Image: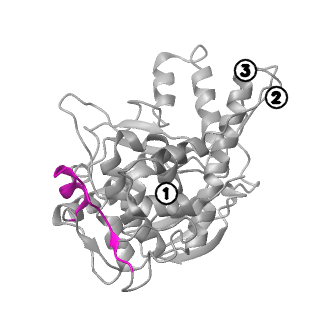
Amino acid sequence: MADLSPKEGLKNIRDEGTTPVTFNDPSKEGLVKETGCEVGTMVSATVEIKPLPEQAAIINSAGKFADYLTSRWSQLDKSRRMVIDIADKGPNVDLPELPGSIETEPTLNYYISGSLATMLLAQAGSFSEIDEKDINGFREVQTRNIPEKAQNILATFARPIGDLDFVTTDSYRKKQAAVQASFKEVGEDEYTRLRSLYLWKGGGGPSFDEIPENAKKCLNHGENQLMLFCDPVESYGAKRIAKVNVEGKDYYIARPDSILAYKVLHLLQSYDHKPDKFNADFGKLLYAMKEIYTEEELLQTTRQVLSDYEKAMESCSRAFKNDGGRESYEKHIPNFINKVLSNKKVATEIRGFIQAIGDLG
């Protein structure tokens, strides 16, 4: 595949029969099994890619695990009890349960991201995008189909997960804070019970003893590990969420275009640490997403996520320095981009996409 110029960007990556797509060209043999592709294979838009048998089994197990997870820790809070902030009475005040005559709407607790979200997406024939301006309204603004070709490519990402990636909402974090603040007010048993209702960073999540056997194949289980590690991840700007249905059950996951956008952000931050893995994964993920979205939609979401990240970093920097905005802030993203593009190992798909992102302003 010829290198793309900055002006060409991704123009020809998806053209049927003209530009082959390199799914991976790893230098390490260990990546062959992980990606489900042969070393150095050039895969064109007309070649069918399917997961390996063991990956299909992991995908199936992921659905079982997601069912257990969301049954044990619901993604929706349908409680009729309200928690509000009152500054002079501590962080939170727990109000009595609302009467049945008052209609209430559920609120979102968390949505699934990372590998589990990708494996759920690989099993869904479509997904609905949730209005990012009002995530608790659950208004579905657009439904997109997932072509079989994209499903098969996404399924090749199947691998046992070592931790659970998810994004919590503001309301969920407030409820967790209320639990933490109750430590001195309730007995130890009640405090333990309250904590068990939430997913906490670290080991405060699913116990391997409680997870159904058919849901364990998608998990990495250390020899002395009692619980699956939980990793609530950062999101920047709007919450970009999709609803998928797998085997008759709805799940809320990271919106697919944002999965690619955050892959770009993580790549920019740490490409030097694992270039072979990024090279192996990015082309596949990009090709799958281009079966679902237009190129411009993917670029637009990526630009927005990178811009939101930059704003968050600037805000943190100013708060830390407490300089009232007097000292100029040096943007991170341009430096990340220059560093990645100067790396001779960077794959063509990565270089083309980053070049097409352009100036974020």
188 relative to 255, above or below: above
125 relative to 200, above or below: below
Q: Is residue 207 magenta?
A: no
User: What is the CA distance from the residue labelled 1 to the residue labelled 2?
Assistant: 32 Å
Mark 3 belongs to which amino acid?
A: Lys
Mark 1, residues whose alpha carbon is within 10 Å: few (<14), some, or many (≥20)?
many
Mark 2 belongs to which amino acid?
A: Gly
- Residue 321 - label: 3
Marked residue nearer the N-terminal end (1 or 3): 1
**In front of the other: 8 or 176:** 8
Q: Quadrant of residue 95?
A: top right
- Front label number (1 vs 3): 3
Mark 2, residues whose alpha carbon is within 10 Å: few (<14), some, or many (≥20)?
few
- Front label number (1 vs 2): 2
Mark 3, residues whose alpha carbon is within 10 Å: few (<14), some, or many (≥20)?
few
Q: Which residue is mark 2?
A: 325
Q: Give the x, y percent position of residue 75.
A: 52, 51
Which residue sits furthest top?
Answer: 184
**In front of the other: 239 or 272:** 272
Work out which quarter of the rendered image holds the N terminus and state it.
bottom left
- Colour scheme employed for the rendering of this structure: one colour
Marked residue nearer the N-terminal end (1 or 2): 1
Q: Give the x, y percent position of residue 216.
A: 24, 48
Q: Residue at x 68, y 35 (%)?
A: 330
Q: Secondary structure at mark 2?
A: loop
Q: Give the x, y percent position of residue 26.
A: 25, 55
Mark 1 belongs to which amino acid?
A: Ile
Q: Which residue is mark 1?
A: 259
Q: Does residue 336 appear in this view?
A: yes
Left or right: 298 in relation to 162: right
Q: Is residue 25 magenta?
A: yes
Give, as a single range, the part of the protein colored magenta: 19-37
